[in-house]
Structure formats: C-alpha cells, structure tokens
C-alpha cells in the first residue's frame, strides 16, 4: 500500500509540477559548468561512458528509491528516515543518513552559490559587449580578473544566496513553475544555437571524438564520473527525497525518473558538444578546470550573429537553472527546521542561507587570496584548495555514500510490500529496479570506492 501520510509543507499542485521541479533541481551548473570541465580534465571518451553507465545503472534506481522514501515519509529527510526506520522496525540510527545529507547540502550550496555568482556576473559582462570579437586570451584574462577579485566574487555570491533564500522562504512551489516551464526549454534552444555555432568552427568532429572515443582513465576519474552521476541528478543527500515528500500519491515514480534522467543527460551532452569544438578551434586545453565554460562560450558569443543578445540570454538562463537547483539543495534543511524547531519558513531559510553564505567565503577566497592554501585528506586527496576539497568531499564521497545507504535501506531493509505498493510499476519494471538497487548499484559504489582508495 502507498502510505497515507500528509506533508505539513503541502503538496505539488499537479503531477507535472513535481517533474518540472525535480528536473529543475537536476539540470543546473552540474550539467553546463561541471560536466564539460571534469570531462576535459579526465580525458574525454571513457569518462563520458562511465558517467552514462553510472546514470543508468546507479543513478536511475537510486532516484526512484529516494523519491519513494520521500513520498512514504512525507517529511524532511531526517524525519523521514527516522519515521521509516520505525515503520520497518529498523535501527534508529538510520536517521544519521538524513543528517549526513543535510551537512552535504550546506557544503554543496556554499560553493554552488559562488559559481552561480560567476554566471550571474557574466550576464552583465556579456551584455556590455566586451566579448565582441575578443580573442581566446582576452576572454581568459577577463575570467582571470573576475576570480582574482575576492570583493566581486563575494558580491555575486551574496546576491545569489539572497535570491535563493527568498524563493525558499516563500515555499519552493511559488514561481518554480514559470521558471521551469518556460526557461528550461529556452535554455535548451540557446544551447542548441551554440552547438550549431560549434559546427561552424571546423573542429566539431574533433569535439565529438574527444567526447565519445574511449581512451585512458584513472581510478580517480572513475570515482569522479560516478560522483558526478549523483551530483547531476541531485541524489544522495535528500534533495530529491524532500521533493518526493510533496508528491501526490498517484504519480508514477518510474516514469518521472526516466524523464528527469533523460532530460538531465541530454543537457549535459549538448553542453559538451557546444564547448569542446570551441576549445579545439581556439587552441585551448580541455583540462582548463572550473573556468572552462567561461573561457570558451564567450568566444562563441563574440563571433556569432547577435552573439551579445544570445550570450546575455544564455547566462540569464544558466543563472535560472542554477537557481532552481540551489533551492532544492537547502530545502531539506529548511523543512527540518520548520518541523522540529517550530519556526516559520522565512526564519528557517534566513538561518540556513546565512550559514551557507559564511561557508561560501572559503570558496570565494580559494580562487584568490587562499589559492596556495591546500588541504589533504588521507587516502582521498592531497593538496586541494578549499573549493576542490569541498567539491571532491561532497561529490566523490558524501553523495555516493548517501546513495549507497539509500539503496541498502530501500532495497534490503524495507519490506517488499512497502516498496512494491509505493512504486506500483508493472512487474518487470519493479524487478529490474530491485536487482539494480539491491545488487548492481551498491556493489558498483563499493568497488569504485575501494579502488579509488587503492584497497583493491
Ligand atoms: N543537480 C544540480 C546540478 O547539476 C545540483 C544539485 C541540486 C545537487 N540539488 C542537489 C547536487 C543535491 C547534489 C545534491 O547542477
């Protein structure tokens, strides 16, 4: 049976609303900013292949599990886990899974907001026309000027955090519909325009080959690909779970998941196809790092017909995509505060926003005054800046770990009658889901972890 619980935070007004919101959460900087740069750093083809496999075999079943747990528990991930553990007569400590997710959310949003600030600032930079006819060096140096200035980064980070906090304080539903129904398809159209431009550079096939011809990959590359599958689908920390908790009972979880995963993957691949030809046409390196899109796309906007307009619109839409993702990252913490501390959403969002903003200062500084300061975590990584440390710790460790525990809980510890009733899929869909969730996903995550720390 599906559960009869109700969420105190309300429900999505329609089935479609959930799909839109979850797609808005999934499609964001992860697809357009992060996917191309980590693909570039990890050598292309094989990395993309591993990423696609991880989406299909690990991400999709875990997303279904997360939505299902959320809809059954109908509360913030922390309280959902404690309620469900009780329902299923399991150890109370499962609530820690909710806590880990909440911590991961703070860490992720703290840097996500800084990068979203870059996108925000590029709206104005592109609109000013500075990129018209600019060379690759010119564009790179404009990016360098931005990130080396802590004051400017701080200002944009602050603006973005305020934007996020305001929306979350009003409840994630208000405004989300417009944002996603109209802006997401527009983003897709603009992305296609840049891909069309990339086809004219004469290096399009080089980009395609880079992305799809298998080559070398390191163990760490495999871990990064897997971590990114979690990141890009917003999995492993409760964001999708909390969205699931507002889901009307009749919605098909399997169909919603299929749509979200396909849309998310399509956007990422298109972003790669837009960017790599520009990289090769301008003698840049695919492994440029986090600045990759900011050093390549403006070249295209500087050269194409009506590029200033297209470019400005592109960065506006990218900012919206980041915005709809950011609100899902703090929703678990805000929902928990409202449930447990009896405060209203405005107060809860303001606190969560403030804590995240302070944490974000570390990322702001890691691109300038702290650029030589590095951290190491034994077995995991050496000499990473604050930003890299946060990024790797969350994507490569916390999210897969969260996903692993979600798979174990939903696959093994929940009674089959509970999960079957909730998923309500045709028999073979349920069976495939169960095999992926019980065996394939957890074993794959464990093997990748063990290999990355060189235990096997
Ligand atoms: N998936 C989003 C992106 O690709 C980011 C995101 C939103 C996220 N919610 C999340 C990442 C929860 C990890 C966990 O940009």
Image: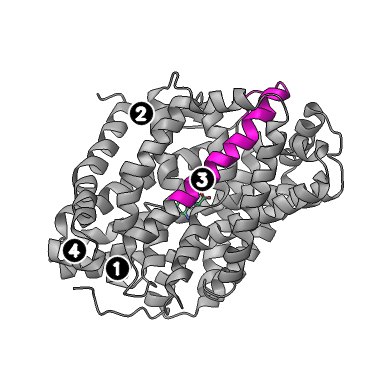
Which residue has dot 3 on it?
Answer: 266
Q: What is the spatial separation of the Cα atoms under label 2 and label 1, in whole angstroms?
A: 33 Å
Instruction: Look at 38% across and 81% down and name the residue there.
Output: 8
**Residue 282 is covered by the magenta coloring:** yes
In the picture shown, does residue 308 fall above or below 23? above
Disc 3 residue crowd, few under 14, some 14–19, many 20+, Cα 10 Å = some
Give the label, 4 or 2, closer to the camera: 4
- Label 3 and label 1: CA atoms lie apart by 32 Å
Tell us which disc is closer to us: 3 or 2.
Answer: 3
| Residue placed under numbered mark 2 in the picture | 379
Question: Between tags 3 and 1, which lies in front?
Answer: 3
In percent of width and height, residue 447 lies at 26, 32
- Give, as a single range, the part of the protein colored magenta: 262-288
Q: Are marks 4 and 2 in contact (CB under 8 Å)?
A: no
Query: Which residue extends farthest top?
Result: 216
Question: Would the CB of label 1 be found within 8 Å of ligand 1?
Answer: no
Q: Which residue is mark 1?
A: 80
Expressed as whole percent of the image width and height from the top left, the position of residue 156 reads 71, 54
* Dot 1: element: helix
Q: Name the N-terminal-most of marks 3 and 1.
A: 1
Mark 3 and mark 4 residues within 8 Å of each other at the beta carbon: no
Q: SS class of the residue under badge 4?
A: helix
Whichever of labels 3 and 2 marks the residue nearer the N terminus, that label is 3
Q: Which residue is mark 4?
A: 420
């Amino acid at each position: 049976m599906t559960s009869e619980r109700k969420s105190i935070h309300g429900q999505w007004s329609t089935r479609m609303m959930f799909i839109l919101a979850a797609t808005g959460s999934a499609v964001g900087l992860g697809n357009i900013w992060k996917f191309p740069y980590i693909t570039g750093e990890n050598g292309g083809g094989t990395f993309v292949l591993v990423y696609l496999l991880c989406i299909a075999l690990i991400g999709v079943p875990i997303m279904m599990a997360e939505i299902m747990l959320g809809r059954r528990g109908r509360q913030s991930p922390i309280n959902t886990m404690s309620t469900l553990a009780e329902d299923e007569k399991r150890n109370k400590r499962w609530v820690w899974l909710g806590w880990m997710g909440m911590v991961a959310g703070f860490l992720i949003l703290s840097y996500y907001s800084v990068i979203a600030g870059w996108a925000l600032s590029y709206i104005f930079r592109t609109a000013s026309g500075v990129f018209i006819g600019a060379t690759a060096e010119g564009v790179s140096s404009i990016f360098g000027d931005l990130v080396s200035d802590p004051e400017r980064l701080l200002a944009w980070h602050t603006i973005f955090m305020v934007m996020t906090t305001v929306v979350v304080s009003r409840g994630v539903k208000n405004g989300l519909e417009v944002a996603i129904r109209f802006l997401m398809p527009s983003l897709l159209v603009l992305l296609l325009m840049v891909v069309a431009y990339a086809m004219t550079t004469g290096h399009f096939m080089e980009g395609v080959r880079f992305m799809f011809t298998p080559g070398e990959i390191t163990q760490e590359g495999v871990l990064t690909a897997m971590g990114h599958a979690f990141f890009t689908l917003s999995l492993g920390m409760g964001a999708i779970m909390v969205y699931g908790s507002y889901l009307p009972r009749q919605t098909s979880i399997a169909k919603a998941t299929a749509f979200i995963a396909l849309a998310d993957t399509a956007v990422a691949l298109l972003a790669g196809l837009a960017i790599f030809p520009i990289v090769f046409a301008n003698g840049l390196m695919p492994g440029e790092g986090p600045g990759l899109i900011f050093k390549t796309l403006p070249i295209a906007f500087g050269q194409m017909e009506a590029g200033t307009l297209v470019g400005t619109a592109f960065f506006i839409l990218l900012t919206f995509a980041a915005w709809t993702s950011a609100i899902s990252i703090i929703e678990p913490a805000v929902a928990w505060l409202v449930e447990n501390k009896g405060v209203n959403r405005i107060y809860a969002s303001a606190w969560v926003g403030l804590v995240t903003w302070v944490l974000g200062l570390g990322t702001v500084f890691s691109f300038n005054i702290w650029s030589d300061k590095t951290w190491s975590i034994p077995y995991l990584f050496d000499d990473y800046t604050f930003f890299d440390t946060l990024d790797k710790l969350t994507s490569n460790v916390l999210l897969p770990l969260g996903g692993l525990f979600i798979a174990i809980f939903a696959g093994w510890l929940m009674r089959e009658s509970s999960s079957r009733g909730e998923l309500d899929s045709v028999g073979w869909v349920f069976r495939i889901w169960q095999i992926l969730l019980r065996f394939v996903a957890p074993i794959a995550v464990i093997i990748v972890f063990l290999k990355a720390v060189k235990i096997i």
